[in-house]
Image (cartoon, rainbow, N blue to C red):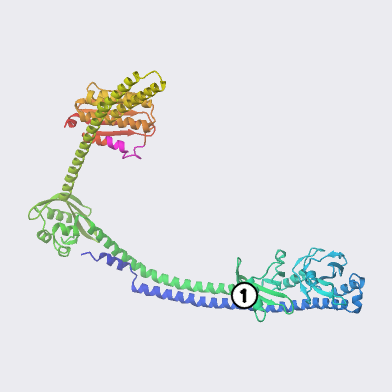
Amino acid sequence: MFSAAPEHSRRLRRPSATVQALLLLSLLMVLATVVASSVLLLDLRQRELAHAQGEIASLNRVLAEQTTRTFEGVALVLKGIQERLSDDLGRQLELDSIPVQLLLRARVGGLPQVKSIFVVDRAGFGVNSSRPDFVRRLAVSNRPFFRHFAEGARDELFISRPEQAHVDQQWTFYVSSRLDDASGQFRGVVVAAINIDYFESLYEGISLDAVNRILLLNNEGLLLAGKPKGEDELGRSGISAPALAALRNSSDGVLVRREENAAGTRFIAYRQVAKYPLMIGAAVDEAEALLPWRRVARPIIGGVTLVIFLVLLSAFFMLRNLLRREALESDLKERDEQLRHMVQSVQDAIVTIDADQRLVLFNRAAERMFGMPASVAIGSTVEEWLRDSSRRPLGTEVQRNLQTALSSPPGLVLLGIVELASEDQEFPVELSLSTTLVRGRLLATAVFRDLAERRRSERELVATNRQLQELSASLQKVREEERARIARELHDELGQLLTGMRMEVSWLGGRLPDEPPMLAGKISAIKGLIDQTIVSVRRIAAELRPLVLDDLGFAAAAGWYVDQFSSRTGLPVTLELPADDPRQDEAVATALFRILQESLTNVARHAKASRVEVRLELRGDEWALSVKDDGQGFNQGAARNGGIGLIGMRERANILAGHFYVVSAPGAGTVVEVVIPRSKARE
């Protein structure tokens, strides 16, 4: 009847078509708003990046032109000095003469980018300069600006790497030109010391928002000057090898690249300076270039967020009203389904009857018990149900109890045993009746629990336990018999053989000559080994099964074992035994001795005790053995089931219909007690 309940429950949890349509419309509006605003923001972003790239390209071109004009002024000055010193009058002047110094000072006056101009002779010594503090005869033969022309180069200009000047220790790079004598031989070089601070102050004056890095590089890509100023970077590579190769291969000497570094993404434009082995680089970080875009994007994102919030808020209020009503209905139906499912899963037969004595609930267990499908039972009267069921109640007790329940106030509970009968047998059933009020209607619920199966299971469990106890007793008996047999064979046969062997060795030792003495020592050693073996055999035989237990009974065996235990562990043991001895009951004596053994073993292993008390009493028709120590004890709650030793002692007591007790607490010692009835043990 209720096979479709899980599917029906899942269908109740699914949102209705109205809720789905409202959710879909809200999601589409949000998605359209997000997509439109994202497309707009991406387009603005691309435009801003393109604008930033255009700005750095334009600035790059302006800087290249300005750098060209700056170096043209330096080149013209150097060319003028070169021409003056190469004409007829200039060739007659010594390079270190006053007229040459005046010429250098006159030329350097209108060039703010030039710190000084000096002349180096063919031997590589500085001989004249526009600076009054110039150090004469300063050796510069190893400097690149001199070596370049001294080695035969005939370029118009040479621009060196940046370095610290020897005179003022300022960062400088040098522009040099060749001087020849009348025969065209190398006469020396004229050198202009370029002030790097001039270029850096020039670049610092540029305040474009889209540019945050300006580089002046030589033709090898080494940094000559830049913004922001960084003296530790001068003379190092300011362009990557792939970018330098691409710039050299470009047709117009211009390159715009996107580069990734540790700080993020950067756009940089490189341009070769016309006529000179120089390059200009202008760079902007993507984060800096996107600052205007962010200023525009923030209000757009805020507006879109506000629109989405309003859409979602409106949808929320609309959905809340819809879902509240549907949730209440769904929750009610789901609880009803859960209740029905639980009722169906119960193994007891459940029947619910309304005030008109008609069945409103009939679970699967009731179908099996009464042999009637729920589709037939539900809706029928109590009389029809009891009449048509395969198991009918003996008498009218069931019907009378149901009528009593329906006429009683809510909360009534009735318990009883009734008999149901089929065609060939009767079944005892436990009947539980209860009444409740549901939506103003009184309902009576009857629970039928089949007792026949329970009683059969209980009988089988009792029989199984009895068989297990018999098997355990048999195993204990067989094990003790086997131990006794092995102990006697070790004591009698192996012990006699070892004794005979010792006598033979003693006889042999008495007939050996006095010399050599080593043989007598060997005979003594063999006799000692045989004596040790005899002691070990006796000890093993006693541990397997003390013969004194079979020959003299429990009292003698207990006394012997306690003495052995005290001598082995050093613990004093007090032994109290009654006048009677359970030796006539072999099973009792064996069980008591083994429990005593295991208890003392546990004391030696775990108790850390200083003394032990062992007492055997005959209490009426019961033997009571207790082993008490003053050791550290243990927590019985933490070790409720006990170890193998405790389980074995408890099992020995149970086999003989006895009881086993352990009383212990941390720091209070331990008491082990076993009580075995004499009469049950004999059986």
Please provide percent x and percent y for residue 58.
67, 79
Closest to the observer, 325 or 586: 586
User: Above or below — where is 70 with respect to 407?
Assistant: below
Does 295 lie within the magenta span?
no
Closest to the observer, 651 or 95: 95
Work out whether residue 209 can be spotted.
Answer: no
Q: Which residue is mark 1?
A: 257
Q: Quadrant of residue 233?
A: bottom right
Please provide percent x and percent y for residue 240.
64, 70
Magenta residues (range): 635-649
Closest to the observer, 156 or 559: 156
Does 645 lie within the magenta span?
yes
Q: Is residue 192 left or right of residue 456?
A: right
Q: Quadrant of residue 264?
A: bottom right
User: Above or below — where is 191 with respect to 485?
Assistant: below
Please provide percent x and percent y for residue 604.
36, 30
Specify the quadrant that holds the C terminus: top left
Please provide percent x and percent y for residue 183.
87, 77
Badge 1 density bin: few <14, some 14–19, many ≥20, Cα 10 Å: some
Q: Quadrant of residue 653?
A: top left
Looking at the rendered structure, the secondary structure element under dot 1 is strand
Work out whether residue 539 can be spotted.
Answer: yes
Q: Amino acid at mark 1?
A: Arg
Residue shown at 38% from the left, 30% from the top: 631
Q: Is residue 135 left or right of residue 490?
A: right
Residue shown at 91% from the left, 72% from the top: 94
Name the outermost residue toward the bottom.
251
Name the outermost residue toward the left.
424
Total numbered labels placed on residues in the image? 1
Specify the quadrant that holds the N terminus: bottom left
Q: Is residue 224 left or right of residue 5?
A: right
Q: Main secondary structure of the magenta part?
A: loop
